[in-house]
Image: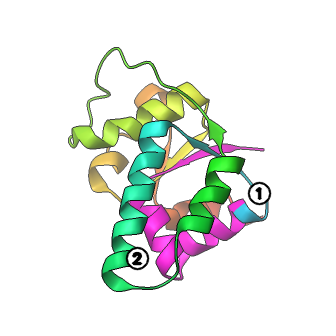
Amino acid sequence: MISVVLDTNVVASGFFFSGPPARILDAWVDGRFTWVVSPEVFEEYSRTLLRLSARFGGPDPARFLSRLAYRAAWCHPVVSAPAGCADPDDDKFLHCAAAGGAFIVVSGDRALLRMFGWQDLPVVTPRDFVDIVLSD
């Protein structure tokens, strides 16, 4: 089974809307891949989902976050140098992927997508992930 790191924009889009990000979350629920998270990444997911839910309404993310906390493959990156992403806040996803042995990072963020190949790690859009990895 492949290991995957999801950027926060993918998680938020999948949680609140339909489309490729929602298909990715459904695939994880169905056990089609292992979701790798670090404490820093999980904190960003939590903060973002709770803020968006409070602001715009919609489903309560608490149960989802609890399930993720229980089922995720946790890693604890030891960061010795920045990954070099144009948005340094996105480095945490690359460090998480490297520390957790992830096969791929899925993101809609241009700065992160430009990091394709960092430490031989593919960074792809949700649509590409669905079309290439989940199509079988």
Whichever of callouts 1 and 2 sits on the residue coming sooner in the sequence is 1
Check the image and report above or below for 78 versus 97.
Answer: above
Colour mapping used in the image: rainbow
- Label 1 – label 2 distance at C-alpha: 27 Å
Check the image and report above or below for 16 versus 24.
Answer: below
Q: Secondary structure at mark 1?
A: loop
Q: Secondary structure at mark 2?
A: helix
Residue 98 as seen in the image, left or right of residue 55:
right
Give the label, 1 or 2, closer to the camera: 2
Residue 121 as seen in the image, left or right of residue 3:
left
Identify the residue at image location x=23%, y=37%. Answer: 88
The front one of 67 and 100 is: 67
Q: Which residues are magenta?
A: 1-28
Q: Residue 92 appears at what percent x and percent y?
A: 38, 36
Q: Circle 2 is placed at which residue position? A: 53
Residue extending farthest to the top is: 80
Residue 101 appearing in the image: yes
Q: Residue 95 appears at what percent x and percent y?
A: 43, 30
Circle 2 packing at 10 Å, graded few (<14), some (14-19), many (20+), is some
Q: Circle 1 is placed at which residue position? A: 32
For the N terminus, the quadrant is top right
